[in-house]
Amino acid sequence: MDDINILTFSDSTEQNCRTLKRIHDKCEAWARKHGCQFCPEKYELIHFSRTAKKFNMKAKLRLEGQQISLKSDIRVLGVQLDLKLR
């Protein structure tokens, strides 16, 4: 599967990571049922905030026993996004 993005928001980056894991588990179940698979090696994680000091911007996400790399900027369908959405 290509070009899948999951976005979540809450009062903490740790809660966002827990939500992402829960959503990912549901996506994995759907993929198995439909004969698809994801490529966790390509997963990226970024936390967006204009007030980064209020949050743990280093909160980590572990899926399928693999640490998802935390990025300071990512490209989504050709658009470059950074931590502050600038």
Image: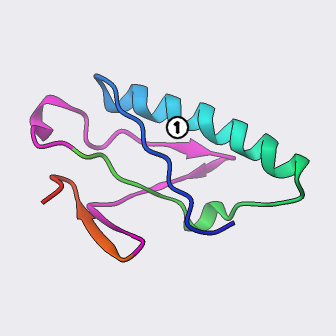
Amino acid type assigned to the residue bearing label 1 in the image: Leu
Q: Is residue 78 left or right of residue 37?
A: left
Q: Is residue 33 left or right of residue 42?
A: right
Q: Quadrant of residue 3?
A: bottom right
Q: Position of residue 75 (x, y in %)?
A: 36, 71
Residue at x 56%, y 59% (from the top left corner): 4
Residue 21, above or below 31: above
Q: Is residue 81 left or right of residue 5?
A: left
- Rate crowding at label 1 as few (under 14), some (14 to 19) or many (20 or more) other CA atoms within 10 Å: many
Circle 1 sits in a helix, a strand or a loop, which is it?
A: helix
Residue 29, above or below 83: above
Residue at x 71%, y 36% (from the top left corner): 26
- Labels in figure, total: 1
The magenta segment: 49-77
Residue at x 39%, y 29% (from the top left corner): 14
Q: Position of residue 10 (x, y in %)?
A: 33, 25
Look at the image and say whether residue 1 sits in the magenta stretch. Answer: no
Q: Position of residue 5 (x, y in %)?
A: 50, 55
Residue 70, above or below 41: above
Residue at x 52%, y 37% (from the top left corner): 20
Q: Position of residue 35 (x, y in %)?
A: 89, 58
Residue indicated by mark 1: 20
Quarter of the picture holding the N terminus: bottom right
